[in-house]
């Protein structure tokens, strides 16, 4: 069983994703939804502000944290370089897990 704090965070994510993304998607069939999810997760991670991250996206938050820790770093972060950041969702892993459950 998941700890209460983890369940709470998951519930917040699901409610936010449902409100801000699923409500605007074409939900006519599962393959169509699965095609739209990577773009939605990309937006969620790159653009969507998170109150727990001081109204920054997870990637923006991570870039700022990295810049503070290593100001001489000039190479851009890899697209998957923000795992472990609160609010970050890896679209590839999410879609892979959904497809494996079928």
Image (tube, rainbow, N blue to C red):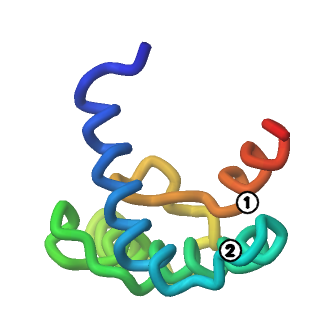
What label does residue 92 carry, if any? 1
**Does residue 47 appear to the left or right of 76 in the view shown?**
left
Q: Is residue 61 above or below residue 102?
A: below
Residue 75 visible to the viewer: no
Secondary structure at numbered mark 2: helix
- Count of all numbered marks drawn on residues in the image: 2
- The residue labelled by disc 2 is 38
The answer to which quarter of the image holds residue 61 is: bottom left
**Does residue 5 appear to the left or right of 78 in the view shown?**
left
Residue positioned 30% across, 66% down in the render: 65
Residue positioned 70% across, 51% down in the render: 93
Kindly report the distance in space between the C-alpha atoms of the residues bearing marks 1 and 2.
7 Å
Q: Nearer the viewer, residue 86 or 67?
A: 86
Q: Nearer the viewer, residue 73 or 59?
A: 59
Q: If the image is split into quadrants, where does the C terminus sit?
A: top right
User: Alpha-carbon neighbours of circle 1 within 10 Å: few (<14), some, or many (≥20)?
Assistant: few
Q: Is residue 74 above or below residue 14?
A: below
Provide residue 101's location: percent of width, then percent of height.
Answer: 79, 36
Residue 1 visible to the viewer: yes
């Amino acid at each position: 069983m998941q700890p209460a704090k983890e369940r709470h965070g998951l519930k917040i994510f699901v409610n936010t994703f449902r409100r801000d993304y699923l409500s605007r998607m074409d939900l006519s069939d599962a393959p169509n939804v699965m095609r739209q999810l990577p773009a939605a997760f990309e937006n969620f991670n790159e653009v969507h502000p998170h109150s727990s991250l001081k109204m920054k996206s997870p990637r923006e938050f991570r870039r700022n944290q990295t810049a503070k820790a290593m100001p001489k770093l000039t190479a851009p972060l890899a697209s998957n370089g923000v795992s472990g950041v609160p609010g970050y969702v890896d679209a590839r892993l999410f879609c892979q897990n959904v497809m494996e459950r079928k």
